[in-house]
Image (cartoon, rainbow, N blue to C red):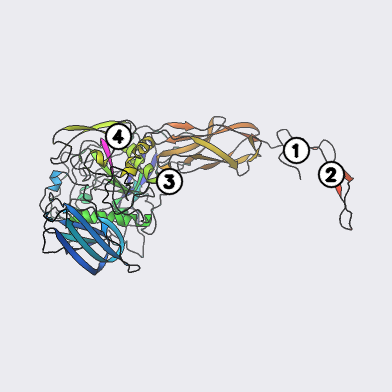
Amino acid sequence: MALGAVVAGGGVAVATVAMAGSPGHGAAAAQGPVKTHVHSLSLTGAGASLKTLGARSTAPFSMVGVTWNGAHAKLRGTVEVRTRSAADGHWTPWLKMQQPDDIPDPAELSRPGVRGGMSPMWSGPSNGIQVRATGAGKATALPGGLRVDLVDPGKPATGGTQDSGMGLAAYALDATATGTVTPTDSVAPTATDSASPTVTDSPTATDTPTATDSASGTPSTGTSASPSASPTSWPGQLPTMDQAYPSCPASSASPSTSASPTPPDPMPAATTSTVAPPTVVTRAGWGADECAREAGYPSYGSAVKAMFVHHTDTTNSYSCADSPAIVRGIYAEHLNQGWRDVGYNFLVDKCGTIFEGRFGGMALPIVGAQTYGFNTNSMGVAAIGTYTDLSGGDSTASTFPGATPSQAMLGSIARIAAWKFGMTGVSPGTGTATLTEGASGSYGFTLGNSYTFNVISGHRNGFATDCPGNQLYNALSTIRSYAAGPVGAVSVTGMSGGGAKSGTSYYTKGAATVSWTTATPSAVISGFDVLVDGKAVAHTSGSARSASISVAAGSHTVQVRATHVRGSTTLSGSVTLVGDTAAPTFPTAPAVRTRTGSVSSTAVPVTVTWKAADNAALAKGA
């Protein structure tokens, strides 16, 4: 593992980024990439319009793909599969696979050996398969070379430290053509496949106490000032030659392991953003086998001008602990079709965890394989799951019922957009971009023509598909709002930890814990400041919803200010907090007199009266 420093927030905060491909510096190295295995079985049949594979036991797998000869060949019909659970031995009903719609551009698609294929389907741990492919009509021939690909995504090695590769979404390398690593003594936090990766605080370069947003990874700048939105640059984001051309065993499946190391031409320019990078699970973190992809650098555009949002069209009933395996499965099947690498630039699960996609440097405009004809100068962000609602505009062929995308997922997609469009100065809320169609044969689009898109668009805006499903497509306006800011309404909900309410005000001897709420996801919130009489006295991460403060004697106004990752602020309404250090006084002595009631040997009914006074307020007497 190689570690590089990333300067975030326009100043002194330093966090680590883990990358695969070279020896470690100060960090416990991962025990190696996670090896995936693909076992392919041919479909057979005497008829041209029906090909099958009978039910049978197989080696373990968790993802299913169906592919055929010819990248440009179309399968006009349906493909259905049944899988047998490795846990209980039960077979699923017939499940329809989705037609492919995430496709490389012609330069990648037309290479020798590239296969057509259905969208891969996550089955979970399975050990049995049955397949049938049926043409749309008796006279509709299916493409040749049909086979089912059973993908075992593997498991991380056990018995030692597994490096998560969790870090900010920017390679921090020396800005030379060879991209020499600039190591630091810092280390990245760790996580395993057993749970969704956890983000921890990043080390800072000063002795000033800071807080780090556990959702976005954005370091704060101190306890009294709001995080800065000044331009943030990195020394460089290009992977090294050793990372682009890893040293692989002779048995490696890399399509071009013997390629002569060559730097990108033209060399992509380093990027600068007004928004700090989000925290992601790097390729090393999810276990990418870099020897499996095509060796070398990817193609680069000039700048990311648009984001196309996708869904993977896989089950929504996955555990977020399975997300790294799902990403490895998609990676393996895309490679099995002959693609250079995984098609997406980023993937996001329902827990809001962001995964690095195609190799090449997340801060750079990598050409992916996600929106046919518009892969250059765009990025593809895939939401793991299915988000159709079948109310119109959605394909009825999907097996899996669509889910409502989680707020965590929407927030993380917005977080990527805020960072990327901070590089070009375009508002993710209202901005548009013009892209040139780079492919022929894309329904509704003409090669060489220019088309205008919202900078945050759905896959269906650039290709004839229902992706990303109605529910996610209808949420794009929410993603745009989250990405653009400001943070929505912030409300102070109460005080505890020494603060108590009396009437409409709170009272304390000095200390209090302020609590608040907002409907905006933490991923796009840089941090919160608690203001007392207009002055910030406490700063928290964007995921926090409370903070401890102390006040002097007297009446004070308390407010909470939220800062969006793009720098705008939102101020809550004020509440009154009274610092009351003087104890109540008793002007007269208490009086006791008997009253009517039952007298016993142990009790006599009496009435006690007193007068108490306080300079602020009285809570109760006892």
Local crowd size for mark 4, using a 10 Å CA cut-off: few (<14), some (14–19), many (≥20): many
Local crowd size for mark 3, using a 10 Å CA cut-off: few (<14), some (14–19), many (≥20): many
Q: Work out whether mark 4 precedes mark 1 in sequence or the reverse, and give the earlier one.
A: 4
Q: Work out whether mark 4 precedes mark 3 in sequence or the reverse, and give the earlier one.
A: 3
- Nearer to me, 26 or 488: 488
Query: Which residue type carries mark 3?
Result: Ser
Secondary structure character of the magenta stretch overall: strand
Q: Nearer the viewer, mark 2 or mark 4?
A: 2
List the residue tagged with mark 1.
Answer: 584
Q: Which residues are magenta?
A: 304-309
Query: Which residue type carries mark 1?
Result: Pro
Query: Which residue type carries mark 2?
Result: Val
What label sits on residue 105 in the rendered view? none
Identify the secondary structure beneath mark 4: loop
Q: Work out whether mark 2 precedes mark 4 in sequence or the reverse, and give the earlier one.
A: 4
**275 within the magenta span:** no
> Alpha-carbon distance for marks 1 and 3?
44 Å
**308 within the magenta span:** yes
Q: Work out whether mark 3 precedes mark 2 in sequence or the reverse, and give the earlier one.
A: 3
Location of residue 372 in the rendering, given as x and y in whole percent from the top left corner:
19, 43
Q: For residue 499, which quarter of the picture?
A: top right
List the residue tagged with mark 4.
Answer: 423
> Alpha-carbon distance for marks 2 and 1?
18 Å
Q: Work out whether mark 2 precedes mark 1 in sequence or the reverse, and give the earlier one.
A: 1
> Alpha-carbon distance for marks 4 and 3?
23 Å
- Residue 191 visible in the picture: no
List the residue tagged with mark 3.
Answer: 214
What label sits on residue 608 in the rendered view? 2
Query: Which residue type carries mark 4?
Result: Met
